[in-house]
Image (spheres, rainbow, N blue to C red):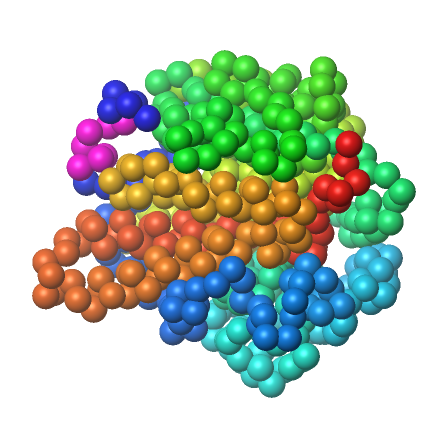
Amino acid sequence: MTPADADPQLITEGAPLVNGIDWTTGETLPPPSPFALIKDIDTDPDDVRRRAETGGEFGLSTADIEDPDDLRQTGWGVLFGANVRAEVKAQLTPLLEHRAKQAHPFKVFEGVHGSTAEDVRIWLAEQNVGFATVNPAAGVPFYLLIVASPEDISFEFQYMLDTYWAVGRLHFDSTDGYQRYAEQVVDYETASAVATSRTVGIFAPRNPGDRSTTLLFHQVVRPLAEGAQLFRPLGERQNFTLRIAVGEEATKDNLRAMLAGSGGSRPAFLFTGSHGAYANATVPNRLDRIGSLVTQEWEGAGSPLSEACCYSAVDLERDNSDLRGLIHFSFACYSAGCPTFDTYALQLDGTRRRLLDNNIVSRLPQRSLERGALAVLGHVDRAFSYSFHNDRFVPQIQDMREVMVNVLRGWRIGRATDQFNLRWAVLSAALSDALRDGPHTGISEAALATQWVARDDARNYVILGDPAVRLRVEDMK
């Protein structure tokens, strides 16, 4: 990135760059409120910070486990939320029977409920384990699938459990989504051939006058597509070819074509980097809009969003898209879920801005999984650019790129994404130290707030789908 591509004041102060677009106004979402950040700044439990000390590639014990992708060594389990109906459990039977044949141990945990980090600790204690390097033989398998709404088992519960375990979530608004997903995963893993080729898709608009997508374009997209001084283009070492639609080419029609495989190979792995949409209660079908991907057609700040410049769950259904065998990494606000209240902004009376009546899993990833995607890696709440640079806006895309390369190596998605958990733990430890030592070192409240946002930005990545899925790279042509 050149100095002209960034705001000098932002570089000086290290303030978070605003992401996400309001559907009605076309303006970027409100910037983080300094009062909200300082008022609510907190530290994670000791269990998270200890993870930073142990480090490692993943939270699994290597003393007795030679292959962390071998379910016979790591095990697999499912956590059914307390309000999950018997019908849903029955629809997942194909996947459960498939994993039961593969995994040791195989566990089904019924009636789970949890909203806080303390709830995770209590649940683990009930299984006679705690936050430590995972030994599946102790009773809790390494790969864990949560089947519950985020109201029943919260995102916070998922974040915490994922610090050491490999955790994914399934939740569909439509009941038949569970059966479709289960059957498609089993079909993918047992078929004689795979539906996708060794192709990586990169889709990233650079909207007019927009700093967020410009920064993403220079610091992430171009290095992934073209390589950089320290690394090759994404997938080159793994013998993947690139299919690219970026900048002016990142149109809605080109995204549709990429997903359909028209005009080229359909990707096995897709990275999209864009704004995500937020829609308030005045917007018809708002749940279909929240988390939709803003494409190049958006003309910039002040231009209201519309179907013409967003790719949403409605488009996926209308196109009848076949996403079998796809893993999608979606860097965008609300690309995995949206919380009830805005974490980063307060209203004039000091209360949090209400976003929704309930926490939700966004509909675009839901529909993607129903249409055959193996997993979606996305963001709950707003996504900030700290995922790919430090607080001085110096590019640091190693963590993001490492996650992508791990997927292309054929690692199971829950293991492949562990770099984000380790980053969260490291940032949590740094924030804790800063809060402790700040009065003695003179660290400013603004700097503390910046560290807090960066920590949450790393924490809020989640896997939607079975964390044990992987690309069958050995069978791709």
Q: Nearer the viewer, residue 23 or 186?
A: 186
- With 460 as the anchor, is 465 left or right in this view? right
Q: Is residue 88 in sight in this rendering? A: yes
Q: Residue at x 33, y 47 (%)?
A: 345
Residue 415: x %, y % from top left: 60, 56
Q: Residue at x 43, y 51 (%)?
A: 458
Q: Where are the magenta residues, as a range?
A: 6-12
Image height of 216 relative to 45, above or below: above
For the N terminus, the image quarter is top left
User: Secondary structure of the magenta portion, mostly?
Assistant: helix
Q: Residue at x 89, y 42 (%)?
A: 192
Residue 133: x %, y % from top left: 53, 73
Residue 448, magenta (yes or no):
no
- With 247 as the anchor, is 142 left or right in this view? right
Residue 379: x %, y % from top left: 51, 46
Q: Is residue 340 in sight in this rendering? A: no
Residue 346: x %, y % from top left: 31, 49
Residue 106 lies in what quarter of the image? bottom right
Residue 7, magenta (yes or no):
yes
Q: Residue at x 49, y 37 (%)?
A: 332
- With 114 as the anchor, is 24 left or right in this view? left
